[in-house]
Image (cartoon, grey):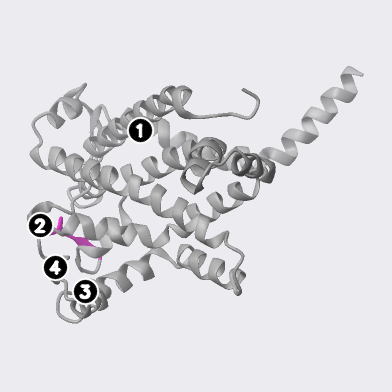
């Protein structure tokens, strides 16, 4: 039996070896290497020199880093609630028994499969202050047309607006969760005289709260690491990108990228990456701890 178990283990490891090797080479080693480089002065062309905690202490006096962190937190604080609310509302609309329902669901999900670079250049055109369709539509409605990509007041909302374009993926997950809510609960609530709002508050929301926890965590992490959208919106020429008007579109990941591949401060960028990891870890832990108060599981 021991020999058979050993052979089975070897076979299992052999089948899993492509993943194990790929994980070790392309994920585990870079993670450990970045931790080592975060304590060094490394520019990719010379051997790294140990500097202790200098990279971490330098962050305290780096004004652009704090501005990039503030921009990222602003975008996250605005984008996460909007994503959840729009996705939840859209899922209810897509769940209505109307003609052409499959087509509407496909159209909502379609932007999520568009490559991010294509979407970025598309939104640069849509948000153009002179000939963009967004300002054209606002003009038809009699609303003011902001300078989305040129105004410090509107640059960060422009990033959020572009990010909400792909809310269809979150919406589809909510739609699947709505299908799992037992119809008997709605019938019982209706018999008790509960209206639409009370049915949502006491039936739909508790049943969707575990999915909402997952969605909030994933969306938080996505916005904290946001890079492609602001990079493409502020791209001036090939492979170069500014921080937008007054650096208001400079996110933490963009500044990390600039330090690593523009300024060639790989050690400093590695330290920034680990700080971002710790911030993400703390926020995720706080969300999980808070879930005890508002997440309802069917078994409890």
Q: Residue at the location (48% across, 39% down)?
A: 201
The first of marks 4 and 1 along the sequence is 4
Mark 1 neighbour class, 10 Å CA radius: few under 14, some 14 to 19, many 20 or more: some
- Residue 46, compared with residue 91, is above or below; it is above
Report the Cα–Cα distance between label 3 and label 1.
37 Å
Instruction: Indicate the secondary structure of the residue bearing disc 3.
Output: helix
Instruction: Indicate the secondary structure of the residue bearing disc 1.
Output: helix
* Mark sitting on residue 138: 3
Question: Which quadrant of the figure has residue 290?
Answer: top left
From the image, which quarter does the C terminus lie in? top right
- Provide the residue designation for mark 4: 146
| Label 3 vs label 2, nearer the camera | 3
Report the Cα–Cα distance between label 2 and label 1.
26 Å
Which sits in the foreground, 65 or 205?
Answer: 205
Instruction: Indicate the secondary structure of the residue bearing disc 4.
Output: loop
The first of marks 2 and 1 along the sequence is 2
Q: Residue at the location (54% across, 40% down)?
A: 208
Labelled pair 4, 1 in contact (Cβ < 8 Å):
no
Residue 230 seen in the current view: no
Which region of the structure is painted magenta?
239-245
Point out residue 289 in the picture as x, y percentages from the top left corner: 43, 22
Which sits in the foreground, 210 or 115?
Answer: 210
- Provide the residue designation for mark 2: 152
| Label 3 vs label 1, nearer the camera | 3
Report the Cα–Cα distance between label 4 and label 2.
11 Å
In the drawing, does residue 201 fall left or right of residue 228? right
* Mark sitting on residue 280: 1
| Label 4 vs label 1, nearer the camera | 4
Residue 99 is one of the magenta-drawn residues: no
In the drawing, does residue 249 fall left or right of residue 84? left
Q: Residue at the location (24% across, 69% down)?
A: 238
């Amino acid at each position: 039996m021991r020999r058979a178990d050993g052979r089975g283990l070897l076979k299992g490891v052999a089948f899993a070896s492509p993943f194990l090797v790929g994980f070790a080479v392309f994920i585990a080693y870079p993670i450990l290497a970045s931790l080592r480089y975060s304590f060094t002065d490394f520019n990719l062309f010379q051997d790294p020199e140990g500097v202790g905690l200098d990279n971490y202490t330098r962050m305290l006096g780096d004004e652009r880093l704090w501005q990039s962190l503030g921009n990222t937190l602003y975008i996250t604080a605005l984008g996460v609630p909007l994503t959840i609310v729009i996705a939840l509302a859209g899922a209810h609309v897509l769940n209505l028994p109307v003609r052409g329902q499959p087509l509407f669901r496909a159209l909502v999900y379609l932007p999520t499969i568009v490559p991010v670079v294509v979407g970025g250049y598309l939104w640069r055109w849509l948000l153009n202050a002179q000939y963009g369709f967004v300002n054209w539509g606002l003009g038809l409605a009699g609303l003011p047309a902001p300078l989305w990509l040129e105004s410090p007041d509107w640059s960060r909302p422009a990033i959020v607006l572009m990010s909400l374009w792909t809310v269809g993926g979150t919406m589809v997950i909510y739609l699947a969760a709505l299908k799992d809510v037992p119809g008997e609960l709605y019938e019982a609530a209706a018999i008790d005289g509960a209206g639409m709002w009370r049915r949502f508050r006491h039936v739909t929301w508790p049943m969707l709260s575990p999915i909402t926890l997952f969605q909030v965590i994933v969306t938080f992490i996505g916005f904290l690491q946001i890079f492609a959208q602001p990079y493409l919106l502020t791209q001036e020429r090939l492979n170069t990108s500014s921080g937008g008007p007054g650096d208001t579109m400079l996110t933490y990941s963009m500044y990390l990228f600039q330090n690593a591949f523009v300024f060639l401060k790989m050690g400093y960028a590695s330290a920034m990456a680990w700080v971002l990891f710790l911030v993400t870890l703390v926020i995720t832990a706080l969300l999980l701890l808070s879930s005890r108060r508002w997440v309802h599981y069917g078994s409890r």
